[in-house]
Image: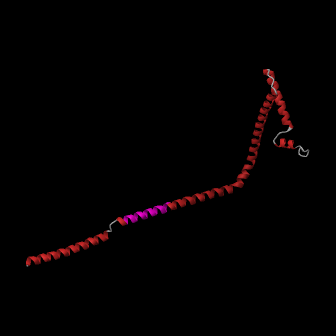
Amino acid sequence: LLLDAGNLAGVALAGAGFDWKNILLNFVTVLGIGSVLTALTGIVLGPLGLALMGFGVGLLQTEQGRRELVKAARKELVKHLPQVAQEQAPKVAEAIADCFVAYEQEVSDRINADIQARQAELTNLVQQKESVEINQGQEIARLQHTAQELTETNQKIEGLYQQFLRD
């Protein structure tokens, strides 16, 4: 109706929650509070004082309006929340499942990497041990061969000594 009449300012004010009834109520309230203050204190408020008081009353009305809006929003939310929860439950469950799958994959990758690192470390340690370790079988064979050579050499020396003693 205001827009049809070409009253753009009225449409903007109505959209913001201002209408002539609220403005009139605010004006009457400010005049009433100003009259009470004048009667009690004897101080007459000037235009600036009345404007500040009007601003304060407007803030109180705005706060009351905000509270009413929050109450209405809560009622609407309580009405629609079960339906929204039912509609969104599969999406939420899927998102949670995806998170767990990604987490499982990450943990599995880390475990596999740790296993491979430990396996490489163990392989390296075994190689180091084998390179430093004396092969017992080879060492025994070498010592037996040396002992046999010494025995043969000893027998040759004994034979030569016996021959020297005979001659």
Q: Is residue 40 left or right of residue 89?
A: right
Q: Is residue 105 left or right of residue 80?
A: left
Q: Which residues are magenta?
A: 114-130
Residue 89 vs residue 33, the one in the foreground? 33
Q: Is residue 150 above or below residue 43?
A: below
Quarter of the C terminus within the rendering: bottom left
Tell me where residue 4 appears, x and y as whole percent.
91, 46
Q: Is residue 85 left or right of residue 105?
A: right
The reply to whether the magenta stretch includes residue 116 is: yes
Residue at image position (85%, 34%) is: 24
Q: Is residue 107 left or right of residue 129?
A: right
Residue 78 vs residue 104, the one in the foreground? 104
**Mainly helix, strand or loop, the magenta region?**
helix
The reply to whether the magenta stretch includes residue 123 is: yes
Residue at image position (78%, 38%) is: 65
Quarter of the N terminus within the rendering: top right
Tell me where residue 161 appears, x and y as whole percent.
12, 75
Residue furthest to the top in view is 42
Q: Is residue 147 above or below residue 121?
A: below
Q: Quadrant of residue 141?
A: bottom left
Tell me where residue 63 appears, x and y as whole percent.
76, 37
Residue at image position (78%, 33%) is: 55
Q: How is the image coloured?
A: secondary structure
Residue at image position (86%, 36%) is: 21
Tell me where residue 112 appears, x and y as whole percent.
51, 62
Q: Quadrant of residue 23?
A: top right
